[in-house]
Image: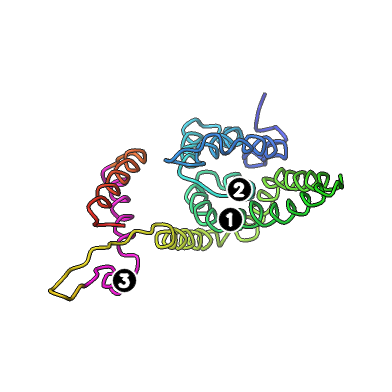
Amino acid sequence: MNKMSDNNYDSQGRYIVTKKDLRKANYRWLMSVCTFNYQTQQGGSVAYALSPILRKIYKNDDDYTKALNNHFQYYNTQPWLAGIILGACVAMEEKQGLAAKDAVQDFKVGTMGPLAGIGDSLLMTMIPTIMGSIAAYMALKGNMFGILLWMALIFVIFFLRMRAFEFGHKQGVKIITEYGDKINYLTEAASVLGLTVVGALIASVITVTTPVKFKFGAVAMKIQPMLDKILPAMIPVAITWFSYYLLTKKKISMTWLILLIIVFAMFMSAFGILA
């Protein structure tokens, strides 16, 4: 059968992603936490979820492997909302193929932080806490509507989650068709956003200080306040830079890096150099 004449291909021979493809990817993404690991976190799940679509988009084995490896890189965000981003990535690759490879990766990195913040605080914390409290209170009072309210909430979230890929794909197509000539600006903006998010995480997540202080007779001088005046979060930045150096230049694995940091932290803490 000639694939070029298939209704799922456009006039230029590019595969047109269908709703069935997106729903299949959505079903696969439901197992997103199953492949979680410290090196790529959700990267394996992304590759698993998108692999059937990528296989249809890229008929050439080499192109398919490149696209799959691109999605196998580090990725971590709130799983319920991730389908929106992945659907948009599918749209970008559907229209531009491997030419959109860097844009796809920058887009994923740039949006996973804000998406995780919204999803964790809104979907994982605020709404379940409020609705769960109401449902539990009603159940304690013997009102069966309490459990029905909780089940309804679960079904609504699940329904919206199952439409995430389709919504993201539709908006991704819109970005490509309406702003296709400005895709380079979008890529650059996503890169800047990604670097900003990662940079902010260094100062907010890595909390390493030094309790070391020098004594000159009766006068004691702490080192940490002096470092903060020179550059806030200097020690976390130095540790991050050194970790990046080991990963990129020395090519050590993430697992060995984690073990190295654990041993380093224990050693420095035991001798009172870092806290």
Residue farthest along the left direction in this orientation: 217
Q: Amino acid at mark 1?
A: Leu
Q: Amino acid at mark 3?
A: Asp
Residue nearest the observer in this picture, 245 or 256: 256
Based on the displayed image, in which of its 4 quarters is residue 53 positioned?
Answer: top right
Where does label 1 land, which residue?
A: 115
Expressed as whole percent of the image width and height from the top left, the position of residue 147 reads: 81, 44
Packing grade of label 3 (10 A; few <14, some 14-19, many >=20) is few
Question: Relative to 28, is 118 above or below?
Answer: below
Residue nearest the observer in this picture, 212 or 141: 141
| Residue 82 tag number | 2
Magenta stretch, residue numbers = 221-250
Determine the secondary structure under disc 3: helix
Packing grade of label 2 (10 A; few <14, some 14-19, many >=20) is many
Where does label 3 land, which residue?
A: 228
Q: Which mark is in front, 2 or 3? A: 3
State how far apart marks 1 and 2 are (Cα). Answer: 8 Å
For the residues bearing labels 1 and 2, Cβ distance under 8 angstroms: yes
Based on the displayed image, in which of its 4 quarters is residue 122 positioned?
Answer: bottom right
Q: Earlier in the sequence, mark 3 or mark 1?
A: 1
